[in-house]
Image (cartoon, rainbow, N blue to C red):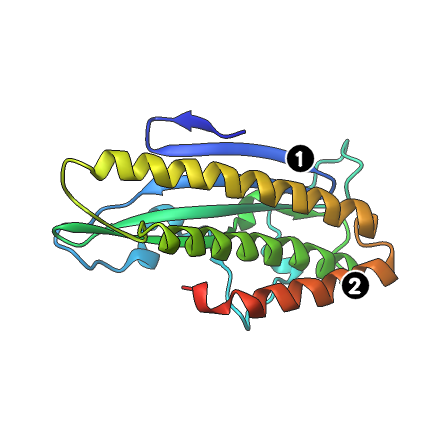
């Protein structure tokens, strides 16, 4: 479940096997409009999902938690950005990886790294699913008027539902692959993830 924080950011941190998922909704406005969103200083420590950009162990910068039984921990987020376009808000959904909150105990384990990439890919899948639902309900761009706050609340409600679905999928991923140690199951999941990403490609921003 997501909890509200400062009325602008909804956060939920869940520990699912080798995964830490941080779900975030945040408002970013620009005056004047059309600023360079990805150059904002508050998201410098962030790697946004890209088709041809894969994680490497150098991206896992946090100190490993020695008492943890986990081999690695990825800090991932589904983020919603509201971009101020003078008389409206454009809505973007992004899958993000946070290096300074992610760690590993085994920097030479390529199988484990591939498994962590799968977690990141699953978050991207649900970021696209959320965008598809926003478009279905004409919430990917909302007018700045008396209904703005109501529409933002509708977006938050959708975000909670999609986030919960993402968590359940991540738990199933870790369980069925035994955190990536079952190579046969990991390969099945890799194929499934790739197919789902292709199916939702039109919702990639």
Residue 81, how many percent across, how many down? Answer: 34, 48
Using residue 168 as the reference point, say whether residue 127 is left or right of it: left
Where residue 197 sits, quadrant-wise, is bottom right
Residue 89, how many percent across, how many down? Answer: 23, 50
Task: Determine whether label 2 and label 1 are within 8 Å by CB.
Answer: no
Of marks 2 and 1, which one's residue comes earlier in the chain?
1
SS for dot 2:
helix
Mark 2 is surrounded, within 10 Å at the Cα level, by few (under 14), some (14 to 19) or many (20 or more) other residues, namely few
Callout count: 2
CA distance separating discs 2 and 1: 23 Å
Farthest front residue in view: 136
Residue 15, how many percent across, how many down? Answer: 67, 35
Give the label on residue 130, or none. Answer: none
Q: Nearer the viewer, mark 2 or mark 1?
A: 2
SS for dot 1:
strand
Q: Is residue 109 visible?
A: no
- From the image, tell me which residue sits under label 2: 188
> Residue placed at 54% from the left, 57% from the top?
124
> Residue placed at 39% from the left, 37% from the top?
156
> Residue placed at 59% from the left, 45% from the top?
166
Tell me if residue 68 comes above or below residue 111 in the rendering: above
- From the image, tell me which residue sits under label 1: 15
Mark 1 is surrounded, within 10 Å at the Cα level, by few (under 14), some (14 to 19) or many (20 or more) other residues, namely some
> Residue placed at 42% from the left, 35% from the top?
157
Q: Is residue 135 visible?
A: yes
Residue 55, how many percent across, how many down? Answer: 61, 62
């Amino acid at each position: 479940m997501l909890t509200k924080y400062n009325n602008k950011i909804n956060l939920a941190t869940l520990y699912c096997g080798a995964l830490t998922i941080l779900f975030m909704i945040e408002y970013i406005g620009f005056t004047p409009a059309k600023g360079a969103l990805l150059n904002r200083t508050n998201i410098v420590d962030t790697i946004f999902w890209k088709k041809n950009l894969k994680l490497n162990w150098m991206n896992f910068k946090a100190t490993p938690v020695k008492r943890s039984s986990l081999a690695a921990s990825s800090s991932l987020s589904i983020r919603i950005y509201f971009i101020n376009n003078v008389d409206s808000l454009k809505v973007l959904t992004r899958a993000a990886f946070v290096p300074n909150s992610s760690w590993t105990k085994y920097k030479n384990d390529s199988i484990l790294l591939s498994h962590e990439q799968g977690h990141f890919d699953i978050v991207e899948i649900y970021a696209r699913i959320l965008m598809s639902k926003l478009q279905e309900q004409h919430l990917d761009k909302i007018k700045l008027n008396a209904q703005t706050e109501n529409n933002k609340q509708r977006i938050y409600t959708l975000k909670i539902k999609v986030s919960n679905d993402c968590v359940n999928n991540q738990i199933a991923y870790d369980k069925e692959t035994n955190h990536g140690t079952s190579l046969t199951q990991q390969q099945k999941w890799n194929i499934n993830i790739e197919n789902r990403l292709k199916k939702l490609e039109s919702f990639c921003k």
